[in-house]
Amino acid sequence: MGKFKYFKIGLGDASFLTYVIAAVVFLVIIYLLYLLFKITVVRHSKIRKEWKKFHNICEQKNLSSQEISFLEELIKNYKIPRPIYAVRSLEVFNRYIFREVLNHRGAETRKKENFLLFVTNLRKKLGFANFEFLDELTSSREIPEGTYTKTVVTIANIKKNFESKVVKVDEEGVTLSVPDHIMKEEPLRENLPVEFRFKLENDAEYKFNSKTYKIILGPPGYICIDHSRNFDRIQKRRYERIDTETPFKYFFLNPTQTKEFQETRKFALTKEIKHESGVIKNISGGGMYFDSDKDLEIGTLIAISFKLKEDAEEIKNIIGNVERIIDNEDDTYRIIIKFVKVKEPFRNQIIHYVYEKKIAMKKKKILSLKRLKRTTTA
């Protein structure tokens, strides 16, 4: 112990340790504040970027200040995750517009009509009028007028079945025709449960569930049904889809070519055409999608050519229509194309390619399960 006689921890040393601990705590707090600041700045920067995208599209679509203010309020009221979804995604637009329409239904008729006209014009400007999804419907708003349906109205737990026709689809809902004998037999009224089925060409059979909000006695008689996102998709689409990584060449039709194609289903090639390259990410006999760094307009026509295999015949002269655009997280866009002109031999090649890939994937899965079973047994 003699050797450590003069080795003592004095008050000064204790103070030093206190200062060290305080300094470490201070540095940790500073670092946490820095992280918080960084996260906040990054988040705000991302939000500003999203709103800039939103306003750029509003400007491109020539929206009025009233229309922009309405969309801004819609985004804030319903806390839509990304502002751009309100002007880019039909599904998002429909979902929240339905709520707005229902909220305005209690208002006076004149005000309601003004609101519906306002929303109808806004829908047209955004390119959401008469919109057809490549994949499938997402709500009753996209049901084509003139569609024939099998309808069931439930009155006091009694189901009344009849065939009807979709005579009108607007912002409020779907208007269905009702046979005269149904109108005479039962007192139809508001808030009755309704189920209606119909087949959509090239897609599937759908069963929607909703309720009546208005009865038009006629004759002819009609029932007006709330828009619904409550439905079953009973059959698969006409064409199976498959993920792929297929290089392709394409160019966009200019206004003159677009007009020619719309009138005659043909167009003249010009020397100024510059082919661009891309990669098909998913394909079917009815359409495809690819990712692009270009923000396109819905309805743009595109000429496409590609080979499904290296040694295969080139599939060319396919004309597609930009049906839908989804914003990716990396500032690129998923461009969803519906084929509007394709030679049947080429379509059959695509269908056969998808079928072969599906079979190969199924075999691979079965083989993998067998191997797993053998390993587990051993």
Image (tube, helix red, strand yellow):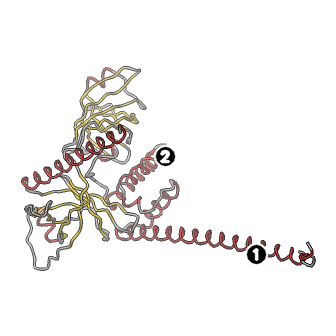
Give x and y (percent) for residue 78. Answer: 50, 53
Residue 153: image quadrant is: top left
Question: Amino acid under label 1?
Answer: Ala
Query: Mark 2 or mark 1, which has the lower sequence index?
Result: 1
Q: Nearer the viewer, residue 291 or 184?
A: 291
Q: Please, is residue 199 above or below residue 272 in the view? A: above
Badge 1: residue crowd in 10 Å (few <14, some 14–19, many ≥20)? few
Rendered residue at 25%/45% (across/down): 144
Q: Nearer the viewer, residue 90 or 288?
A: 288
Give x and y (percent) for residue 65. Answer: 44, 67
Q: Quadrant of the C terminus?
A: top left
From the viewer's perspective, tell me whether residue 264 is left or right of residue 7: left
Considering the numbered disc 2 on the image, is that residue within a helix, a strand or a loop? helix
Give x and y (percent) for residue 94. Answer: 38, 51
Rendered residue at 35%/54% (across/down): 90
Q: Nearer the viewer, mark 2 or mark 1?
A: 1
Residue that extends furthest to the front in the rendered view of this protein: 2
Rendered residue at 36%/57% (across/down): 89
For the residues labelled 2 and 1, the Cα–Cα distance comes to 57 Å
Count numbered badges in the picture.
Answer: 2
Q: Nearer the viewer, residue 40 or 200?
A: 40
- In the picture of the structure, the residue carrying the numbered disc 2 is 103
Identify the mark at residue 311; answer none if there is no mark. none
Residue 265: image quadrant is: bottom left
Q: Quadrant of the N terminus?
A: bottom right
Considering the numbered disc 1 on the image, is that residue within a helix, a strand or a loop? helix
- In the picture of the structure, the residue carrying the numbered disc 1 is 23
From the viewer's perspective, tell me whether residue 158 is left or right of residue 146: right
